[in-house]
Image: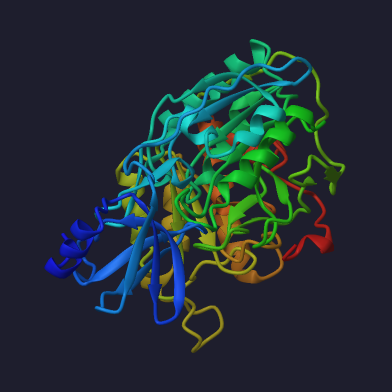
Amino acid sequence: MYSQEIQSLMKSKKLKIGDRVKVLKDGKEFQGFLMPRIEIGDLNSLVIKLDNGYNIGLKYEKRLKIQKMGQGIKLGSIPSKKFSRKPGLPSVSLIATGGTIGTHVDYKTGGVFMVRTPEEIVATTPELENIVNMKTMLRPFTVASEDMNHKHWQELAELVAKELNKGARGVMVTHGTDTLHFTSAALSFMLKNLTKPVALVGAQRSPDRGSFDGVMNLICGSYFTGYSNIGEVCVVMHGTTNDDFCFAHRGTKVRKMHTSRRDAFRSINEIPLAKIWPNGKIEIGNENYRRFDEKKVVADTKFEPKVALVKSYPGSDPEILDWYVHKGFKGIVIEGSGLGHVPTGESGVKIGEFDQKFSWIPQIKKAVENGVVVVMTSQTLYGRVHPFVYRNLRLVYEAGGIYGEDMLPEVAYIKLGHVLGHTKDVEKAKQMMLMNLAGEINKETDPRSFLV
């Protein structure tokens, strides 16, 4: 509740929360919607939502003047839209799963929460009606991306394959950004024979904010799925902090690289496949992609969940690997340093003298002897790991660890779960991990791909 002074002012002016108002204070004019006071706000400050989407607090003083401009918004209501079909437009399906792009602001607390249906999500972007026909809009579940697991990936793969095989030219999946790159990798491995575009789209800013990036991401995702010749899973998100264009990043070569920037997603060890402008222009940046075709896609969703992603660091305790072995894990991906190093326990007093307490080598060897597939990646992200450049790298290799080329740690984790879902044969699993299944391994690194 506002202070008694503000409540008296609202009553005298016949104002209600949600009304559109004009406020004059210190010679400045502000127009917007009268908002409720949030629980942690100042009781004696008026909160106005400006036309740019941002809120402003105005300290109440007797010289403050406020005028009702008309009926405003009904707080808590969310616009919904069902698109009419237009001849000649490509048919695209939308699958909504949650995340910031599907949130709604709670004006009482100032926080956002996930409530939007697919119809409510597309209502933020009415332009889509003139770009594609929405063949189907589905919401199989609504979860924050940090709560995603292999069961969600499996369900999504089944739904995407079903929609594509029923005539959709492409599929857009709206998703939270924090683990978007995990899901893009999972779909890349699970959608076998894919030759149609699948776009994972999210937002870094919520729809109540003036900097909401979901509108342009949805527009670019619609052009990608409806008109591009790329038959792969891609993450389609802002390419700059401005509303310039989106990048289409291959699903196994992309990572979220910033907590809040609108251009947080970057291709790693690869140039983005395309730039997509909100006017529909598509510029191919990387010719190495599968071309569009009408082939039937198969959802191959076998996955071994007993796979771990572990980071090594100076002073890290190697016994963590014993815990995973004891718990029955079938695979471990290690984020090593540099070219794929782990602590070896070398004392530095004498060459070749080791302190086994700090060495990861015995634990890696023990894990391998217990039938666990151990894969080395690098926490540097860019570049590739290699077992033979330094002597200590050879120790991991000789212990049975395999080096995952230029795969991102998260992609290697998803791939290992996918591979172990198909074979229990350790040697075959090792071979499959070094095969390029979905564009996750480049034998040569393009020097232009660093910090692109």
* Lateral position of residue 405 relative to residue 448, left or right: left
Residue 304 in view in this figure: no
* Lateral position of residue 158 relative to residue 244, left or right: left
* Lateral position of residue 103 relative to residue 441, left or right: left
Residues 140 and 425: in front is 140
Q: Position of residue 216 (x, y in %)?
A: 64, 46
Q: Is residue 51 above or below residue 126?
A: below
Which residue shows up at 37% across the image and 42% down it? 147
Q: Position of residue 113 (x, y in %)?
A: 34, 45
Figure coloring: rainbow
Q: Residue furthest left?
A: 4
Q: Position of residue 347 (x, y in %)?
A: 46, 83
Tag count in the figure? 0
Q: Is residue 153 above or below residue 381?
A: above
> What is the quadrant of residue 88 in the picture?
top right
Q: Position of residue 173 (x, y in %)?
A: 56, 33
The quarter of the picture where the N terminus appears is bottom left
Residues 305 and 97: in front is 97
The quarter of the picture where the C terminus appears is bottom right
> What is the quadrant of residue 288 in the picture?
top right
Which residue shows up at 73% across the image and 35% down it? 224
Q: Residue furthest front?
A: 12
Residues 152 and 35: in front is 35
Q: Residue furthest bottom?
A: 349
Residue 100 in view in this figure: yes
* Lateral position of residue 153 relative to residue 56, left or right: right
Which residue shows up at 40% across the image and 59% down it? 49
